[in-house]
Structure formats: structure tokens, C-alpha cells
Amino acid sequence: MAEGIREFEALRVKVDDIVYMPSLDAPVEKPHPFVYFISIHNDSPIPVTIRARKWVVEEDGGEISVVEGDGVVGQTPLIEPGGCFSYNSYHVIGRGARVSGAFFGETAMGEWVFVRIPEFRLEVPV
């Protein structure tokens, strides 16, 4: 990514839903899978391509996992002005957790920008 990346207020991230899905495969040490549904909205007058993401999962016991990578679910979506990109993915955890992060994009003019993912909780049902 380029130097001088700035927060881009015209992009918004919405956590549309979070679903506990015990039927999904999960390792023994992290037996609680959650599916989350996210939408990224472009309220700017210029197209933005999402190039990367960073997730931070902080479990209640203090363990922190950071997931970084190119694109979003194997794509680098171009979000047109007024448009939206929606997707779902999942995290597995060992206990309740706080989740936050950011998406990194490139405007049609070549400027690198980011938008924060609003923090949300993964609560393991009792």
C-alpha cells in the first residue's frame, strides 16, 4: 500500500448480521463458529476498489488474532458511487470476543484510503 493512506469518511461499513453456526466445522480449541454479514457502502462521487482487509479478534481471555490479506473473500470489488458490496464470512473463537478492523481501498484517482469496521461482539450462547 502507498504512503499517506487516509481515512475515507465517504465509505461506510455496516455489520448487517451475526449468526452463531455450531454446525460449521471448527477446530477443537476454537469450537464456536460465527457467520457475519457485512456491507461496504460508497457514499462518495468516485469509484473505490477494495484492495485489502485487516480483522482483529480479541477473545475475552486476552488472546488476539489478526487476519490480514488482499481483497475481500477472494475479490477486489469495485464499488461505484452510491453503490454497495455485501458479503459474508466467518470466524471461529474459543470464547466470546470483540471484533474490529478496516478495509483498505484505492480510489479511481489512485489515492489509498481506509474505512474502519465498527467493533462488534461474538457472544457464545450458554
Image (cartoon, rainbow, N blue to C red):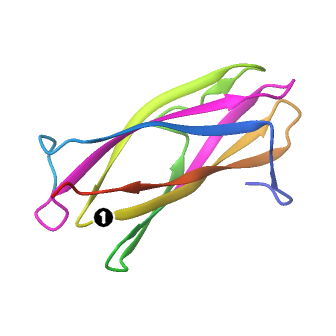
Q: Is residue 52 left or right of residue 64?
A: right
Question: What residue sits 20% from the left and 63% below the top?
Answer: 30
Q: Is residue 45 left or right of residue 13?
A: right
Q: Amino acid at mark 1?
A: Gly
Which residue in the rendered view is the most extreme toward the front?
A: 126
> Would residue 74 be counted in the magenta stretch?
no
Q: Is residue 114 left or right of residue 60?
A: right
Q: At which x and y percent is residue 108?
A: 83, 29
Q: Nearer the viewer, residue 125 or 12?
A: 125
Question: What residue sits 64% from the left and 41% below the top?
Answer: 51
- State whether residue 85 is above or below residue 96: above
Residue 55 seen anywhere in this rendered image of the structure: no
Q: Which residue is mark 1?
A: 96
Q: Count how many numbered circles sit on residues in the image.
A: 1
Range shown magenta: 27-54
Location of residue 1 by image quarter: bottom right
Location of residue 92 by image quarter: bottom left
Question: What residue sits 23% from the left and 57% below the top?
Answer: 124
Q: At which x and y percent is residue 9?
A: 80, 43
